Image (cartoon, rainbow, N blue to C red):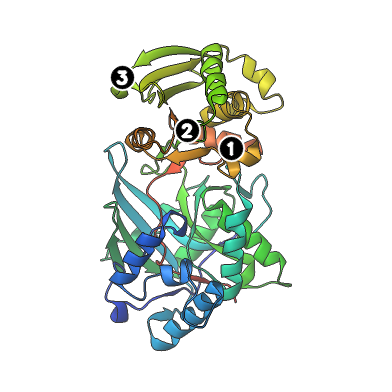
């Protein structure tokens, strides 16, 4: 069962920083050095100073610098600690990558860390070791969860907090993608009890933040006894929330420019495994096409675009023996098994380390990378239905990395969860 609780948040003092606009940031793993510098130009108190720390002055340890900075900001009143535990209602009004408008609801809470399993918490993608170590070092130095894990709940607790969102929000911020985030802290114990009761029987599916959750498990295991370290910060959205959307992440192939044999093997393999239909750039996107194993393929060598359809879906039973039907019919898994492994000889470790493979969020970005020579080919994928994400997780399986793109992202800097 899920143990969902309010928490005594550490958060920005709006009287000091003015608003959340200059101090919040996108998730740490999408920020490059130039964007980090730009965020700190907006405010020296921007959350990247602690969530994506760099060594400063005589302090050569970026994680120690983050811990010292949190303490300094707290003492100077930039950050303040709530005395009463709160839940935080969150709405995100956004324009999706396909141009449609939505409003997604969520609840910020602390959730007890458990092993993965039925009726508890499930992952849906494989993870890499590097980011987990980085987040673990940061957590040990700061003793806070600085950004929430985005999780989906099999039961919807949002109706229990809507009565607390009638007034003006505590804070409102519009990010660079024009998503408007609104926050309402809720101190009412009756609301806390109702949310906890609703979600006690829920299963939680991690949508975004697998590294942070596995970091939380490792952090908890390193501290004996019961306490705040046994919980982690999550933003909880119901699987039935009308504003929940998922989009594809497209695959880019690189490293083939100096390997004509590998390129020839890919060309022949594609024509053996797929029905190939030439198209133009406007017809490249397979969104809406029905069937198993349908992709768009942009060939940088010839400059041509194709639509691909797997010739023999029954072959997947042999290639992915022992896997669930939901996994065997997953586009990202088919591409990994048939193309990346079968034609290009990549291993799961190669994929996870991004050796020869990259990712793009939009078709235009994918084509731009091929045109610019950063990639030699691109595979355009369909979005994974949320029901399939849930089915793969329920089977105890994890998808290849970047099988889903949940939009919009959660901001860092809304509220921090103390671990001590």
Is residue 2 at least partly visible in the picture? Answer: no
The residue carrying mark 2 is 384
Question: Where residue 177 sits: x, y (%)?
Answer: 29, 51
The residue carrying mark 3 is 280
Is residue 344 at least partly visible in the picture? Answer: yes
Q: Is residue 297 above or below residue 395?
A: above
Disc 1/disc 2 C-alpha distance (Å):
11 Å
Q: Which mark is residue 399?
A: 1
Crowding around mark 1 (Cα neighbors within 10 Å: few <14, some 14 to 19, many 20+) is: some
Q: Which of 287 and 85 is in front in this view?
A: 287
Crowding around mark 3 (Cα neighbors within 10 Å: few <14, some 14 to 19, many 20+) is: few
First of labels 1, 3 by sequence position? 3
Question: Where residue 142 sits: x, y (%)?
Answer: 55, 75
Q: Which mark is residue 100?
A: none
The answer to whether 165 appears left or right of 294 in the picture is left
Q: Is residue 81 above or below residue 54?
A: below
Q: In this view, does 155 lie above or below 413?
A: above
Disc 1/disc 3 C-alpha distance (Å):
30 Å
- Marks 1,2: beta carbons within 8 A: yes
- For label 1, the SS is loop
Please give the name of the residue rendered at 27% of the width and 76% of the height, measured from the top-left corner. Answer: 18
Please give the name of the residue rendered at 57% of the width and 23% of the height, measured from the top-left corner. Answer: 261
Q: Nearer the viewer, residue 53 or 259?
A: 259
Question: Residue 172 occupies which quadrant of the picture?
Answer: bottom left
Crowding around mark 2 (Cα neighbors within 10 Å: few <14, some 14 to 19, many 20+) is: some
Please give the name of the residue rendered at 35% of the width and 76% of the height, measured from the top-left corner. Answer: 44
The answer to whether 207 appears left or right of 392 in the picture is left
- Marks 2,3: beta carbons within 8 A: no
* Foreground disc of the pair 1, 3: 3
* Residue farthest to the bottom, as pictured: 75
């Amino acid at each position: 069962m899920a143990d969902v609780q309010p928490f005594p948040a550490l958060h920005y003092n709006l009287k000091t920083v003015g608003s959340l606009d200059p101090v919040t940031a996108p998730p740490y793993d999408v920020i490059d050095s130039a964007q980090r510098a730009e965020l700190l130009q907006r405010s020296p108190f921007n959350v990247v100073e602690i969530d994506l720390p760099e060594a400063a002055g005589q302090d050569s340890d970026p994680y120690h610098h983050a811990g010292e900075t949190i303490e300094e900001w707290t003492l100077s009143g930039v950050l303040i600690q709530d005395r009463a535990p709160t839940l935080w209602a969150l709405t995100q009004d956004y324009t999706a990558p396909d141009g449609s408008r939505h409003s997604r609801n969520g609840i910020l809470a602390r959730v007890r860390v458990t092993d993965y399993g039925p009726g508890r918490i499930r992952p849906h993608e494989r993870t890499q070791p590097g980011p987990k170590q980085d987040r673990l070092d940061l957590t040990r130095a700061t003793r806070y969860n600085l950004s929430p894990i985005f999780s989906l709940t099999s039961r919807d607790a949002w109706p229990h907090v809507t009565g607390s969102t009638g007034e003006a929000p505590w804070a409102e911020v519009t990010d660079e993608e024009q998503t408007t985030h609104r926050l309402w802290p809720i101190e009412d114990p009756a609301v806390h009890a109702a949310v906890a009761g609703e979600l006690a029987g829920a299963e939680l599916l991690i949508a975004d933040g697998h590294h942070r959750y596995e970091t939380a498990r490792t952090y908890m295991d390193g501290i004996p006894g019961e306490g705040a370290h046994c919980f982690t910060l999550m933003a909880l959205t119901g699987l039935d929330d009308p504003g929940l959307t998922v989009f594809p992440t497209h695959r880019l192939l690189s490293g083939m420019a100096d390997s004509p044999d590998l390129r020839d093997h890919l060309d022949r393999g594609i024509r053996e495994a797929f029905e190939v239909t030439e198209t133009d750039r406007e017809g490249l996107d397979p969104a809406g096409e029905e069937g198993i194993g349908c992709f768009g393929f942009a060939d940088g060598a010839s400059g041509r675009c194709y639509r691909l359809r797997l010739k023999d879906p029954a072959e997947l039973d042999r290639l992915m023996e022992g896997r669930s039907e939901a996994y065997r019919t997953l586009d990202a898994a088919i591409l990994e098994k048939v193309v990346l492994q079968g034609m290009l000889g990549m291993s799961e470790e190669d994929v996870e380390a991004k050796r020869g493979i990259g990712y793009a969020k939009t078709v235009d970005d994918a084509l731009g990378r091929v045109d610019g020579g950063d990639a030699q080919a691109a595979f355009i994928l369909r979005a994974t239905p949320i029901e399939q994400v849930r089915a793969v997780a329920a089977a105890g399986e994890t998808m290849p990395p970047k099988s889903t793109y949940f939009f919009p992202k959660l901001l860092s800097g809304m509220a921090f969860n103390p671990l001590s």
